[in-house]
Amino acid sequence: MISEHTKRVRRVDNFGTDPIPVLVLKISIPFMFAQFVNVLYSIVDRIYIGNIPEIGGISLAGAGVCSPILTLLSSFATLIGIGGSVLFSMQLGAGDQKYAKDILSSSYAMLVFFSAVLTAAFLLAKDTLLRWFGASDVTFPYANTYLTIYTLGTFFALLGMGMNYFITAQGFPLLGMATTLIGALANVVLDPVFIFLFRMNIAGAALATVLAQMASCAFVLCTLYRKSMPIPLTFALPKKRLSLHILRTGFSPFLILATDSVVIIALNAVLQYHGGAEYGDTLITCATIVQSYMLLITAPMLGITGGSQPLISYNLGANKPDRIRKTIFYVLALCVLFTTIMFVVSRFAPQAFVRIFTDDPEHMELSVWGIRVFTLAIVPLSFQYVFVDALTALSMAKLSLLLSLFRKTNYFLATCFLPLLFAAKSAFYAEPLADSIGFCTSSLAFFAVYRKYLRGQGRLMGIGM
């Protein structure tokens, strides 16, 4: 009779034995779907907000101003979640379950600490941040209401998102998908209740999101506490050296996500400045719709690449470079296929998406144009996503960070300078320009280093302490 411990070990060990194409589909597709569902938190809010009678457009602009702050908060969940889960997967691959358990408990404690500190910090600084990030006198009350309520739920957002990485890392991608599905469904149900039935408007959207995040967080923690998990969750004070190792490993994906906030801030500020009092809020409203559409592309793609990271890290720890090569190839093929489909959809059917948010003719026309511009280089962008996340999983965080920051720097500069030469809305072209340059640099860098790396040079860097 097979013992329960043996079953648990086998559940994780399939990362090192099952066929790679099957594993990529089993891990990445649920994670891709989970990320797709996760964007519904923001998109569903924006859809309902945009359809609030009389104040829908201006409320949507207020929510758009909050977007970079929400992204910045989420980046701290990535800092601990990816940093800890990558090291966790390496130790499972190396067969060191005791050290893997220490990583899990330390990551949990760090997320609790970060959530408490960030809640206090953002509540104190929110007024100043909103003004910096493009809130006008008209949009400020709506942005302030939304951000205040959302920030109060930071604890649940960070715990749920950060610890969910460890469910997938232990070989349970469907449970990881269920986490985001629970939250998204709760948000979809609660949004119309609070916004329209209780007439709370934008405050109702924020409250619905917080309650949905509470549900996701509860599911994640209950799942990880189960004794049937290969490495059940326990709470222990983090060790200083281990905490620093987690932060170093997660710093690259954290900064990649955090700098997304900088880009959105720059875009909103530039659109508000160059659009002026008459056109600035309109441009931000449309930019919010366009960015919502981009989330339907980038979030699932991040799910594919992020979902494959435990598989790459596990085989790094198990010293199986051939399986790493195959994983990267199939993940890239899956991302290229997905972005190609979305590129075609973006050419022919963006109107259907925009119509969900608004029926204002000016907003619709500008948003459709913006979607077509933003998606000009999404197929090349898939290469950047795959290579950057693969390098992070291979413990080459510095290189992945450099590549991502190079793309973001180009994006930021183009956002700031294009409107100086052309019209305010030319800032939208910064996205495809940065994506094209990022494709070239990340592809050259990746293929220049990763073959040598997988042959043995630095292959086991990051294993152990």
Image: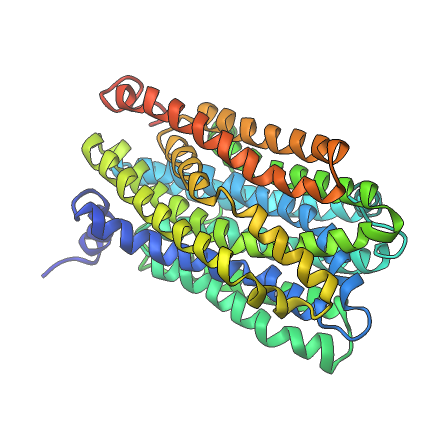
Vertical order, 220 against 75 (above or below)? below
- Name the residue nearer the viewer: 70 or 414: 414
What is the x, y in percent for residue 325?
Answer: 24, 34
On screen, residue 148 above or below 352 = above
Which x, y percent locates residue 327? 26, 40
Q: Is residue 11 visible?
A: yes
Report how many numbered discs are placed on residues in the image.
0
Closer-to-camera residue (143/293): 293
Residue 291 appears in view: no
**Is 188 placed above or below 281 here?**
below
Looking at the image, the residue that sits furthest to the left is: 1
Viewer-closest of 302 and 149: 302
User: Residue 11: percent from the left, percent from the top?
Assistant: 23, 53
Color theme of the render: rainbow
Q: Quadrant of the N terminus?
A: bottom left
The residue depicted at 66 percent of the width and 29 percent of the height is 413
Which residue appears at 75% of the width and 42% of the height? 424
State the residue in front, 121 or 199.
199
Q: Is residue 325 left or right of residue 384?
A: left
Relative to residue 368, is residue 31 drawn left or right?
left
The residue at 33%/27% (across/down) is 463
Residue 307 image position (x, y, % from top left): 37, 48
| Residue lying at the far bottom of the rendered structure | 197
Quadrant location, the C terminus: top left
Q: Quadrant of residue 214?
A: bottom right
Q: Residue at x 60, y 29 (%)?
A: 410
The part of the image, by quadrant, that contains residue 49 is bottom right
In the drawing, does residue 156 fall left or right of residue 56? left
